[in-house]
Image (tube, rainbow, N blue to C red):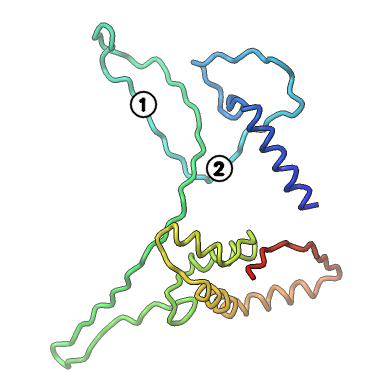
Amino acid sequence: IEQLELALEDLQLALAEANDPSPAAEEGPDTEAQAPEPAEPQETKRRRPKVSKDTPRERRTYDPGENCPDCGGDLRVIGEDVSELIDMIAAQLKVIEIARIKKSCRRCEKIVQVPAPSRPIPRSMAGPNLLAYVLVSKFDDHVPLYRQNEIFARMGADIADTTLVDWCGGAMKALAPLIERIEAEIMASDLLHADDTPIRVLDRS
């Protein structure tokens, strides 16, 4: 079924490219633009994209200025036309530099320093957010580690496949108590559901 869905999606993409559908159905109502006359009734209605109410919003205001461009008279606000655009803020890597200041006591000469913060994987450079990204990409989105290596390379980071493998293993070890708790809850149920749908992967050999 999943393979048929992928084939159907490819056909839909080809049809959309050939038809060049107007994006008017996706945009909100615009008082300035006139609605085009429907040429032919479409078989499928295009659903307007929806985002969560918690999605961050940014307002960009385009003001024509204070004076009329034709006569130079003063302009007054009579309303505004508002439309929405869904945009994507690409993921980016960030290097967090952890600086632990050393101080010495003037009286007893004791060295005082704050302990280093704990890490999900001891002696590893992977932060918790990066590990979550790698695990979700691999096990939920089915993005192989070698492809993640290519994605990180486009971000300007060289993270070897073997390092990603070590990170996954270390993260699974750190999550072992949670995994055991979930397994206990699932096995305690009277009814279990298993999905044995195979996932095709590329054999690099």
In this view, the mark in front (1 or 2): 1
- Residue beneath the point at 43% across and 56% down: 92
Vertical placement of residue 6 versus 14, above or below: below
Give the label on residue 195, or none.
none
For label 2, the residue is 53
State how far apart marks 1 and 2 are (Cα): 24 Å
The answer to whether marks 1 and 2 mark residues whose Cβ atoms lie closer than 8 Å is no
- Residue beneath the point at 39% across and 77% down: 117
Tell me which amino acid carries mark 1.
Answer: Tyr
Q: Report helix, strand or loop for mark 2.
A: loop
Residue 122 percent across, percent down from the top left: 46, 82
Vertical placement of residue 16 versus 6, above or below: above
In the image shown, does 30 or 111 lie closer to the viewer? 30
Q: Quadrant of residue 67?
A: top left
In the image shown, does 135 or 1 lie closer to the viewer? 1
For label 1, the residue is 62
Vertical placement of residue 10 versus 158, above or below: above
Q: Is residue 42 left or right of residue 92?
A: right
In the image shown, does 71 or 151 lie closer to the viewer? 151
Residue 95 percent across, percent down from the top left: 36, 66
Circle 1 residues within 10 Å: few <14, some 14–19, many ≥20: few
